């Protein structure tokens, strides 16, 4: 981790979108944004309009969306962005939502933005209204999610990561005979960036690092960072993960922390968004609860956060504690060591626990109905099968 960062915690789209919009309106040179879901309606329309305004001013605006998460890319907002000059790339476009292959599981799940190489955003927040879900419609309460705004040296790393993905899309599109996603001034695909010459100077006292996961050079970066932090924990481990299907190493690390006297708490999904991961996560409850891990299910709305506070170590990003994030997806987290930031995130999570959490008691869990037990076993088996099909069973 490097010193010299300012890291600001943002909760949900209510805080993230206005902050991002302000930076977009101040942009002078370039913007790179990546997201799994972009729904340019309601709050998302603010960002779509900000993209268009920036592009109309001559700013080079690059937007990359996932081909599965953002399957629909038509409508007035998309047309407005294209007409303004926003460059739109699609990661692994879907030919059919009903076609299955191993490569389909390798999605662009990271959510990041970098403006003028000077400020970056990283987190779990899609470009989607807090009170709308693509599968469930209008929500009564906003989903729980987080992002961070970062200034300082690691912004250059976010810039490199975003530029490199844009270059990859350009190479793939050219090889398939599609319109190029990215061009330099001469019309050729830019070289793969390894570094960005940046004037980013130290902006604050926080030690921070960018954690990427891909299928090339950073296969286990995020998982290893979690395991190191849990292994060094002395006081607390507080993790919020929308989807929770930990591998054996991760479970052993949590249990070892409990044995050392560390308070271990998990804030997990309590409002069913997708049945399979919801019931599969509960298959681990018995082992964890009996060992002394505290589990709280968040039921006020959908939990979408992927964050942790481990003593003074904090991570905020896109990676769930499940095989699809830790083994397959392209993910991005920021990790930081700072007592102030840890305190702010801890306060937000404890407030969520108080206002929308339901603690899971071992005596109630062991008496759950037979059909729930059946769903737990079936869902666990199906997710294990998914890991096997992906070719990653030996690593999880």
Image: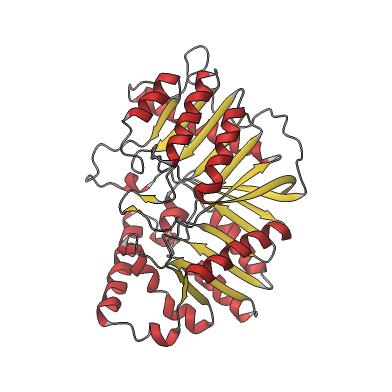
Q: Residue at left 38%, top 38%?
A: 41
Q: On screen, 100 above or below 64? A: below
Using the image as rendered, state which of residue 395 and residue 118 is in the foreground. 118
Q: Residue at x 41, y 54 (%)?
A: 324
| Front one among 122 and 184 | 122
Image quadrant containing the C terminus = bottom left
Question: Residue shown at 49%/53% (left/top)?
Answer: 319
Quick check: 104 left or right of 325? left
How far from the left and from the top, in percent, is residue 323? Answer: 42, 58
Q: Position of residue 320 (x, y in %)?
A: 47, 57
Q: Tell me: 21 left or right of 182.
A: right
Q: Quadrant of residue 67?
A: top left
Q: Residue furthest front?
A: 140
Compared with residue 52, is residue 308 higher up or lower down, i.e. above or below? below
Q: Is residue 296 above or below residue 182?
A: below
Q: Is residue 354 above or below residue 27?
A: below
* Residue at figure coordinates x 38%, y 30% from the top left: 77
Q: Position of residue 388 (x, y in %)?
A: 33, 59
């Amino acid at each position: 981790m490097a010193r010299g960062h300012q890291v600001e915690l943002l909760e949900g789209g209510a805080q993230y979108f206005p902050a991002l919009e302000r930076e977009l309106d101040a942009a002078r040179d370039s913007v790179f944004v990546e997201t799994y879901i972009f729904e340019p309606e309601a709050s998302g329309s603010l960002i779509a309009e900000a993209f268009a305004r920036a592009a109309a001013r001559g700013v080079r605006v690059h937007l990359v969306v996932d081909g599965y998460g953002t399957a629909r890319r038509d409508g007035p907002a998309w047309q407005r962005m294209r007409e303004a000059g926003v460059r739109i790339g699609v990661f692994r476009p879907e030919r059919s939502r009903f076609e299955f292959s191993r490569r389909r599981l390798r999605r662009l799940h990271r959510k990041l933005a970098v403006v003028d190489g000077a400020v970056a955003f990283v987190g779990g927040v899609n470009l989607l209204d807090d009170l709308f879900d693509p599968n469930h419609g209008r929500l009564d309460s906003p989903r729980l999610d987080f992002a961070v705004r970062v200034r300082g040296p690691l912004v250059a790393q976010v810039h490199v990561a975003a530029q490199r993905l844009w270059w990859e899309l350009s190479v793939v599109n050219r090889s398939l005979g599609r319109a190029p996603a990215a061009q330099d001034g001469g019309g050729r695909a830019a070289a793969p960036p390894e570094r960005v010459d940046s004037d980013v100077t130290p902006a604050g006292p926080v030690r921070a690092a960018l954690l990427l996961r891909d299928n090339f050079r950073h296969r286990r970066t995020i998982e290893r960072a979690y395991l190191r932090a849990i292994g060094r924990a002395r006081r607390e481990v507080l993790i919020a993960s929308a989807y929770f299907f930990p591998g054996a190493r991760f479970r052993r690390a949590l249990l070892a922390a409990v044995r050392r006297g560390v308070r271990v708490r998990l804030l997990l999904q309590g409002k069913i968004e997708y049945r399979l991961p919801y019931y599969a996560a509960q298959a681990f409850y018995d082992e964890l609860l009996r060992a002394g891990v505290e589990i709280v299910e968040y039921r006020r709305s959908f939990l979408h956060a992927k964050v942790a506070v481990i003593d003074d170590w904090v991570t905020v990003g896109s990676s769930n504690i499940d095989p699809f994030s830790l083994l397959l997806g392209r993910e991005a987290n920021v990790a930081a060591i700072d007592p102030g930031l840890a305190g702010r995130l801890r306060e937000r999570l404890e407030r969520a626990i108080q206002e929308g959490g339901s603690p899971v008691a071992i005596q109630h869990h062991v008496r759950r109905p037979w059909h729930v037990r059946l769903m737990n076993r079936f869902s666990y088996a199906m997710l294990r099968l998914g890991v096997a099909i992906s070719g990653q069973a030996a690593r999880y």
